[in-house]
Amino acid sequence: MPQAYYNREAGIERLATETGAGQWGSALAFATSHFEMDCTVYMVRASYEQKPYRKMMMQVWGADCHSSPSTLTASGRAMLEKDPDTTGSLGIAISEAVEDAATHANTNYALGSVLNHVCLHQSVIGLEAREQLASVDDYPDVVIACVGGGSNFAGTAFPFAGDKLTGKHPDVDIIGVEPAACPTLTKGLYAYDYGDEAGLTPMLMMYTLGHDFVPPAIHAGGLRYHGDSPIVSKLVKDGVARAVSLYQNEVFEAAQTFARTEGIIPAPEAAHAIRTAIDVALECRKTGEAKTILFNNSGHGHFDLASYEAYYAGNLPDYDYPEELIRDALSRLPKVA
Ligand SMILES: Cc1ncc(COP(=O)(O)O)c(C=O)c1O
């Protein structure tokens, strides 16, 4: 809403954006429809194919949604030429959206994660969670959220990171959870890199797996990003927050437990946080410690039922850490003096 609003105030008529799982693409499609703007969304191919109903949701709100890489942009065509069967990545979809904005009049690019203003908008989540806990005289010992580009984690964790840094709650344990198939915070380099595959964005100081790293096609499509928010990266680098990585099957097992216990079917991305919350709780059971655990269930999984089906059919590969691919991509980091 704020991104659409401020662009409209500046006289912009159309927004171009990327989306992984499709949550941000549908959110922006809804926002632009409110302000009578046009919206074009480049959706990562793997997710576009895994959850086609997200595309229709965007159509309902009047946006055009294209599978990325597409033939509409030079970056998309170059990628298709290099690898016609590519699963796509957020880095590629960002290149397409940035190029689209740069080559059309009255169009701006809107980013759904990573950047400071996006993290700031999301922090309403953590601020509200802190108020809700305060209303029952509680404060979390552990704060958990999954990490793709980092805005969901930032939104949940930044208010608590602030309390930790200012000494109000120095012991709060803040955990970001990512897929083992795209282990940016746990296995990436802390370096300057581009936010997109084609190198069209400014460089960001962040944990990165290399801007042209294409992660395996896990079902948590929203977590398939090679980099991370610079502020989130800095918090992990400084030890204010820590990161863990998980395989798909342990994540879906936790998703099923949560669905059966709470009646809510979570998105595969959100289930990363759920798995970690369950693990922390099980550890408490072992040690006999009582802890208040806050986690963000960042999205429902109603459009992800095909991935639940694949889990039940035993068809979800637990991708090993793609070390070779990452080493190769990291060899092409931009040279910074
Ligand atoms: C349900 C859900 N949770 C979390 C995320 C993570 O997003 P980010 O870390 O980029 O804010 C996504 C991304 O698409 C998502 O779909």
Image (cartoon, grey):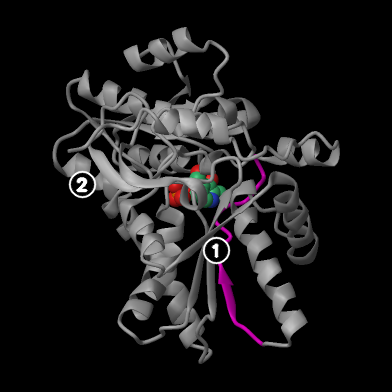
Residue 198, position as x, y percentages in the image = 33, 23
Q: Is residue 105 visible?
A: yes
Look at 42% across and 27% down and name the residue there: 212
> Which residue is labeled 1 in the image?
296
Residue 327 position (above or below residue 123): above
Residue 315 position (above or below residue 255): above
> Which residue is labeled 2 in the image?
6
Tell me where residue 191 sits by quadrant: top left
Residue 317, position as x, y percentages in the image = 74, 36
Q: Is residue 37 magenta?
A: no
Single out the residue that lies furthest toward the left.
10
Residue 273 located left or right of residue 308 = left
Q: Name the amino acid type tagged 2.
A: Tyr
Comparing labels 1 and 2, the label whose residue is closer to the camera: 1
Residue 219, position as x, y percentages in the image = 64, 38
Q: Is residue 298 magenta?
A: yes
Tell me where residue 30 sits by quadrant: top left
Judged by its main secondary structure, the magenta piece is: loop
Label 2, residues with CA under 10 Å away: few <14, some 14-19, many ≥20: few
- Ligand 1 under 8 Å from disc 1 Cβ: yes
Q: Is residue 62 visible?
A: no
Residue 279, position as x, y percentages in the image = 70, 67
Look at 80% across and 33% down and name the residue there: 315
Segment tinted magenta in the rendering: 290-303
Q: What quarter of the picture does the C terminus occupy?
A: top left
Depth check: give the residue in front, 210 or 162: 210
Q: Secondary structure at mark 1?
A: loop
